[in-house]
Image (cartoon, helix red, strand yellow):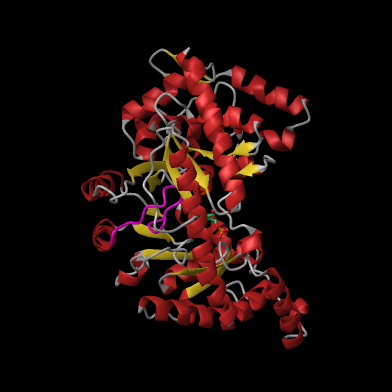
Amino acid sequence: MLFRQVYDYIRIRMKRGEWHEHDKLPSVRLLAMELNVNRLTVFKAYQLLKQEGLVYVKEKSGYYVSPEHLNNREAAYQGGALKHASAPDIRNKLSDIHRVEASNQFSKALIDPGLLPNLFLSDYVKRVFDLYPKLMGTYSTAQGDEELRTVLAAYLNQQFYTDCHASELIITTGAQQAIDLITRMWIRPMDAILVERPTYSAALDVFRAQGARLIPVEFAPEGYDMEQVELLMKEHRPRFFYLNPTFHNPTGYTLPADQRKQLLELAEAYQCLLIEDDSFHDIYFDQRPPRPLYAYDTSGWTIYIRSFCKYVAPGLRICAVVGSQDIINSLIKAKSLADNGTPLVTQKIFLHYFQSTRMQQHLEKLRIALQIRKDVMEEELRQSGLPWTWASPNGGLNLWIQLPEGLSAQRLLEEALRQSLTFVPGAICDPLDQIEDHIRLSYSFMNEASIRIGIRVLAQVASDILDREQM
Ligand SMILES: Cc1ncc(COP(=O)(O)O)c(C=O)c1O
């Protein structure tokens, strides 16, 4: 699939008008060197472009931009799409699915607003405005409110026995912004990134938009194949490994502590940053998960992303990013270019709510409520009589379900949408776009009664497809 990424790289540059009609394109050898890939990979990409009429070959000379490609551009201009024609084609597949209105909502890995202490939160809003009357008239610094950073650094230090200082922490608007800023700072087109397979799909979309080369690392219930990880680091020299090792989205798996330590050794040996996305750390059921990788890191190779959006107050979009001072200084620059700082109002509201005892009580209740919802979903799946399989997670918001044999996720989604039911099909969580036999079901957004109804609808849709296919 690597040749597809080279193909996209050339096609996007042609579309942006970097090469014109009958321009000679870089030779296979040159491009392979520039992109640090095999010549055969570039050759295959050129062959595909040729098949599609976007480039043509001159004997003994090389590849040239075909005028047909420009005709497509002109057609776009005539349609009044000049501005859009030159913008790269990017998308966020997950939010495309979330936009679908459905009464059986299994695609959103969000906490049911009914489980959040909304009235209590609104009390805090008033209190914060009384405390800081000039709040609305003040910018935050790009790094984030110092009071909040100090509280969050102390919280993480106490939780993980670390020694992080407020200056080594930056506040971002959700983990999504952190992923985006890190990618902008560290990735240039065709840089290699290791990503879990499957993984959080909106991170994949950010990496693709930046033109990165995605190298998959399979994530199984027992973790990664560490020999494979080392081989991939050796071969591709990735700029970073983006990982979500605790109650992973979409699978719910957790990387064991020994692999966390090994990974840090590899990161240092191959100079590969570890981007640890830890959005679900506190959403455990029976047992606390292992400490995050960054807590074992003594040489500064991790960037730790700790979002509080999922369970504290999603509307406030507060996330802490922790790293070495150099890393944080780079991120402050990226953050100031992006938005000059997360709004101070939301940071202060979060700060005061986060420190309240009510917040701790909320978290304890939330864990119980989510575990009950997970149990209900699993019970309904088992009772449906269909051979779904999954590894029951110890935390997080999702089940990663292997479908009964012969059932494709895409087909199931098409039919489920007609019954007003959504879920996330495996392929969009796959850096290779291929997983057709898995789906992600979130149990966090709907209440128990709705989960029961929804899973029955889903099972009926699945049985109908299987029956029709056997006829
Ligand atoms: C693994 C992972 N990272 C990041 C995000 C984005 O989180 P935030 O709401 O903090 O931007 C999500 C949201 O679902 C996620 O699952």
Identify the image quadrant of residue 12: top right
Determine if residue 186 is in view. yes
Task: Answer left or right for 53 relative to 403.
Answer: right
Q: Nearer the viewer, residue 38 or 57?
A: 38
Task: Answer left or right for 380 relative to 138.
Answer: left
Q: Position of residue 182 (x, y in %)?
A: 49, 58
64 lies above or below 209: above
Q: Position of residue 264 (x, y in %)?
A: 28, 62
At a point 52% along the width and 33% down the height, the residue shown is 459
367 lies above or below 194: below
Magenta stretch, main secondary structure class: loop
At a point 67% along the width and 42% down the height, the residue shown is 103
Q: Nearer the viewer, residue 45 or 321?
A: 321
User: Count the marks: how many?
Assistant: 0
Q: Quadrant of the N terminus?
A: top left
Q: Nearer the viewer, residue 254 or 91?
A: 254
At a point 49% along the width and 65% down the height, the residue shown is 367
48 lies above or below 256: above
Task: Answer left or right for 449 relative to 25.
Answer: right
Does 387 appear in magenta?
no
Q: Which residues fall within the magenta stretch?
A: 244-256
Does 245 appear in magenta?
yes
444 lies above or below 336: above
- Residue reaching furthest bottom? 131
Determine if residue 145 is in view. no
